[in-house]
Image (cartoon, grey):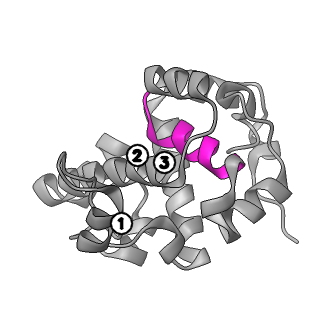
Amino acid sequence: MICVCQEAFNLPFTVGGLELGLLYPKHSNYLAKLMINLSSSNKKNKELDKQGNVSYLEWNREISRRVHYWYTVTNKRGTRHAQTKTGVTTEMYDLFGSHQSPLAGPPENNASAVTQAVVGGKLFHELSVGQRLTLLHALCTSKVAMSPRLQNCFLEYDAESLRPTKA
């Protein structure tokens, strides 16, 4: 998905950049830009692009907000409704459960990001690599499902070329 949408994200896809980002998320500008693109609105993305590099805590806060929204929808209306409303597949809920977000809550206005992160869950780098990958996949599927602009990126490809290849 990331490879297909790289132009829309204004982010050249590199396997090495993604792999290093998943292994060392606190130190990856590539992952920071990708996560901001996946978790924020297009307007916010443009604002952040102008700022340059985004701090780890800032993009962690953005993905926490997005994931907490998914769990709010899930807890109010159920997993099936959440899938329709957010585009998130059941794989994420199978791994993390469907009742509480695995990530720390978004910071309150009067709490520091570090203090708040310790309170409600984990920061992204505290998840296992497999959990990080599942969360990244959920962010991708949600973003594509909710964005006609990104869906159009896939129209340029035939279905067979989008299928995963067996190693």
CA gap, disc 2 to disc 3? 5 Å
Residue 62, disc: 2
For the record, the magenta segment spans: 30-41
At horizontal 68% and vertical 31% (from top left) the residue drawn is 154
Sequence order check, earlier mark of 1 and 2: 2
- Near mark 2 (Cα within 10 A), the count class, few <14, some 14-19 or many ≥20, is some
The front one of 167 and 4 is 4
Label placed on residue 34? none
- Asked whether 40 falls inside the magenta stretch, the response is yes
The numbered mark, 1 or 3, whose residue comes first in the sequence reads 3
Q: Secondary structure at mark 1?
A: loop
Image x and y of residue 84, in percent: 32, 44
Q: CA distance from mark 1 to mark 2?
A: 11 Å
Please give the name of the residue rendered at 42% of the width and 77% of the height, measured from the top-left corner: 95
Magenta stretch: residue 45 in it?
Answer: no
Q: Quadrant of residue 22?
A: bottom right
Q: Main secondary structure of the magenta part?
A: helix
**In this figure, which residue is indicated by the disc labeled 3?**
59
